Amino acid sequence: MVRKRLMIVLFCIQFIVTGCWNRRELNDLAIAVGMGIDKQGEQFKVSVQVVVPAEIAAKKSRGASPVILYSGVGDSVFEAIRKMTTESPRKIYISHLRILVLGEALAREGIAKSLDFLARDNEARSDFYIAVSKESKAEDILKVLTALDDIPANMLFTALETSQKAWAPTLSVTLDELIADLTSEGKNPVLAGITVHGNPEEGSANNSVQKVDTPVRLQYTTLAVFRKDKLIGWLNEKESKGYNYIRDKVKSTAAVIPCPSGGKATLEIIRTKTKVKGRIIQGKPRIDINLRSEVNVDEVGCQIDLTKTKTISQLESLGEETMKKLIHEAVHTVQQKYKVDIFGFGEVIRRSNPKAWKKMKQDWDQYFTNLDVNVKADTSIRQIGTVGNSFLERIKE
Amino acid sequence: MLENGKISLRQFAILVTLFTVGDAILVLPSVMASQAKEDAWIAAIVGEGFGLLVIFLFTAVARLNPGMTLVEYNKKILGTTLGTLLSLLFLVYFLTCAAANIREIGDFMATQSMPETPNQAIYIMFLFVVVMGIRRGLEVIARAGEMFFPGFILFVILFILFLLPQIHPENIQPVLAEGMKPILKGAMASSTYSSVQLVAFLMIIPYVNQPKHILKSFMSGTFLGSIFLILLILLTILVLGVDGTANNTYPSYALAKKINIGKFLERIEAILALMWFVTIFFKITIFFYSFILGLSQLLNLKEYKVLALPSAMLLMVFTIVLAPNTTFYHNVITWYWPFFDGTFNVLFPLLLLSVYGLRKMVFKQ
């Protein structure tokens, strides 16, 4: 009987004593959604964008800014973050980080040292994206308020995802992917760039988002090329798209192709699959890229007869040519201008022929610049849209 | 008889499976990937295959003196002095293994979820459950295993299904790039983390109700556990890649963090931690049970349950003094532990077998 009673008491107690040793209530946390790291002299300047819960809550909003920016300077990232408690009433909590922005100046000097904390700390998860601020400080990027999504870091997260899915020249990279690239012998990292249009100081004022044409905006730019952990340059839009084709990161995009009779048509790419294979021929490495894509005709700006199968196959081969050119140009520029393997061709060679790779990896950059890259593209047109031939044809001049 | 309970073959097999998976579920992939790189899964197959061979050895030893535990027949085979000495060594081994496993729980909790909670608090909570299980006896432990098992299997299946979309087949290429040496190294780690610790079951075999079929049940238990570990290692490398696996202290936890089904089903890594708590609980309980039962048999006690609480206090202190920090612990585990396990799980059983054989030959003449 005593035993039974004791069990009942113990059972009830467990509801009162839930929680752990160092529990922290939600209102003790400063939830950081964005983090920016810049160089300041020899030190790191870390800025975090923290959500102001009262402004996010639907009812009680006072009309103040939905986020607040804290920054700290320290010899290490962790020190800088802890120093922020001198201006923030709550301890910074980084589990819900959405975006990490690395300042361009820091990126040129090397990013590796600033990343260890985020990989090591138990609060950090590796599901946030990393980008480089182009021509501005990381801090300035986090200062800008955005419309449509109240929390700028959330907007940056989704904008990167959406643009990669629908437009292609941007790239979402997570921390573990970046670290894998940094440590790999056969691939150098690439990150998306963010730039701010307009004056960031102006963009941090709450009234800046009250206009239809918000004067200050954030925009993803094309890809940043790294040699190991140092930023060495930027790809242009076409090269970035070519990069994503090679890495099989393209989900959907638009491809403008020249019509046989002049003018332009646009294909909507709906599915792509790239296979990259490596071979060693007479001691020389060679890369074969095989790109298969399914496309729809989405915009016709010229006079072509879409009712004929011949035209369709003509368009298909034009599409193939365009994509091949895109890839060749991307490879060529990187080979000539940057001379670093960002495409992971070294990895491909290592996978296919580990013995040959062992000999080559010492001067892989050399091999890469002279690498023979062979591209095959196969495009199939599936749909031509809701109309047949373009009405352009029927406009009498 | 100190232990009056009897367990069925099925319960025995389940305990073996849970024990085999044990702490390996969380730490093994990292060790394997750092030693055998892309071929870690091949190494795991080799290692687990070797583990199955060791099971033959264990059953052969158990068959020499049916109905007796390891501690009892040590004395019978080697004589009182040597037998007692060997039994003492085994007891130290059991206790060390239990302490190492508890240590792993503490380290895991401190690194992943409760960095400021003193480790002792976690040890006490865990040991409380272990002591409770041991005071209830072997039957209750076995039934608890039976109860947790379906849930464990369900989570394993869900876990694998949820991760399928994130697999990158190129992560396991190239195959056999470095030749056989790293594979053998990895195989050693894989077997000593799982099957080549099963010697503790020599303390439990006498209490199985159908001792004739013990080999089959021992085998199937080990086999199931091994399959799970091989799949897990394959999955971690396929999803996280070699570097990601080797660099993570707890790769399967990182793996669980990766689960994201339609932005809806995510952040469920606690489930993996839960699975691990279940398997490591049985591993610790069985090591600790073997220690307590063995000690009371050695001292000719009438009751083994009285030893549970005092030994738990001993175990707790042992866990704390075992290693000053994680780096030390991981070094010992990676470089010395396989030999420690090998000595107790392969060398000593072989010794027992050969001494028994020699004695038989001498007596015949």
Image (spheres, rainbow, N blue to C red):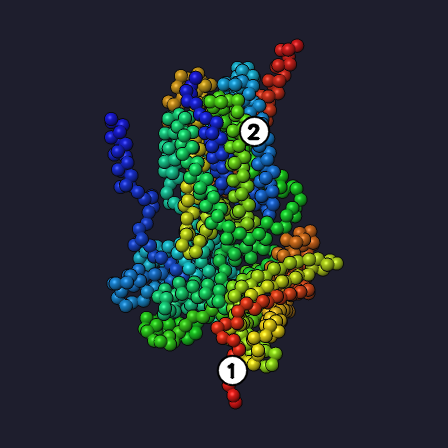
x%, y% of residue B28? 52, 41
Horizontal arrangement in the rendering, residue A201 relative to residue A383 (left or right) = left
Q: Regarding mark 1 in the picture, which secondary structure is present there?
A: helix
Residue pointed to by mark 2: B55
Q: Nearer the viewer, residue A169 or B328?
A: A169
Label 2 resides on the chain identified as B
Residue pointed to by mark 1: A392
Placement of A391 over or under A141, stated as above or below: below
Residue at the spot x=43%, y=74% of the render?
Answer: A197
* The N terminus of chain A lies in quadrant: top left
Name which residue type carries label 2: Ile
Q: Tell if the residue under mark 2 belongs to the same chain as the one under mark 1.
A: no
Q: Is residue A348 visible?
A: yes
Residue at the spot x=59%, y=17% of the render?
Answer: B356
Label 2 to label 1: alpha-carbon separation: 80 Å
Q: Nearer the viewer, residue B203 or B158?
A: B158
Horizontal arrangement in the rendering, residue A242 relative to residue B305 (left or right) = right
**Residue that sits furthest to the right in the current view:** A282
x%, y% of residue B363? 62, 11
Name which residue type carries label 1: Leu
x%, y% of residue A327? 61, 68
Q: Is residue A233 visible?
A: no
Residue at the spot x=62%, y=18% of the render?
Answer: B357
Task: State which mark lies toward you, 2 or 1.
Answer: 1
Horizontal arrangement in the rendering, residue A364 relative to residue A94 (left or right) = right
x%, y% of residue A295? 54, 68
Q: Regarding mark 2 in the picture, which secondary structure is present there?
A: helix
